[in-house]
Amino acid sequence: QVQLVESGGGLVQAGDSLRLSCAASGRTFSTYVMAWFRQAPGKEREFVASITWSSGSTYYEDSVKGRFTISRDNAKNTVYLQMNSLKPEDTAVYYCAAGPRGGGFGSWGQGTQVTVSS
């Protein structure tokens, strides 16, 4: 059973940086896609970034391109989201997700809160 545990959220000021971590366990992820989603108060959950575990190919939502970087550490089975130049509109609960390529994201973490003050 896949388990995803996020950490690294917090309260920061606009322009600051944070790095989120997602520790993954329960299987081999070489055929999986890992992703970060976020959900702001009163809004639907939205895609932020994804990475294909085997190739390292990445994809980003337009509003975070150039500011956020998704990466993975094979040895630690951990996915990261480096967030720079944070804006108040980045405030949300951030979720780590995992799923087989072409199969959708069936596994989710519990979420970590990111709050950016102006």
Image (tube, rainbow, N blue to C red):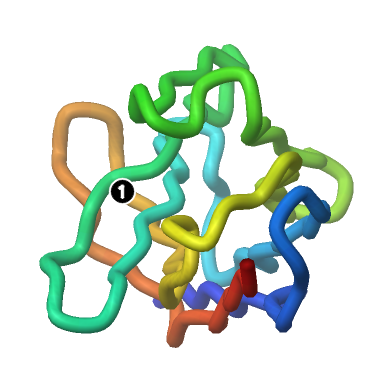
Q: How many marks?
A: 1
Quadrant where the image shows the N terminus: bottom left
Quadrant where the image shows the C terminus: bottom right
Q: Amino acid at mark 1?
A: Gly
- Which residue does the image show at 50% across and 77% down from the upper left? 3
- Which residue does the image show at 51% across and 19% down from the upper left? 58
The answer to whether residue 63 is above or below residue 1 is: above
Residue 80 drawn at (x, y percent):
71, 49
The answer to whether residue 102 is above or below residue 38 is: above
Taking depth in this image into account, of 84 and 35 the one nearest to the observer is: 84
Taking depth in this image into account, of 57 and 7 the one nearest to the observer is: 7
- Which residue does the image show at 48% across and 69% down from the upper left? 91
The answer to whether residue 62 is above or below residue 4 is: above
Tell me the crowding category of disc 1: few under 14, some 14 to 19, or many 20 or more residues within 10 angstroms, Cα based.
some
Residue 73 drawn at (x, y percent):
81, 41
Image quadrant in which you'd find residue 43: bottom left
Drawn side of residue 72 relative to residue 95, left or right: right
Residue 62 drawn at (x, y percent):
35, 23
Taking depth in this image into account, of 31 and 108 the one nearest to the observer is: 108
Residue lying furthest right in this view?
75
Residue matched to label 1: 99
Secondary structure of the residue carrying tag 1 is strand
- Which residue does the image show at 49% across and 32% down from the upper left? 64
Image quadrant in which you'd find residue 116: bottom right
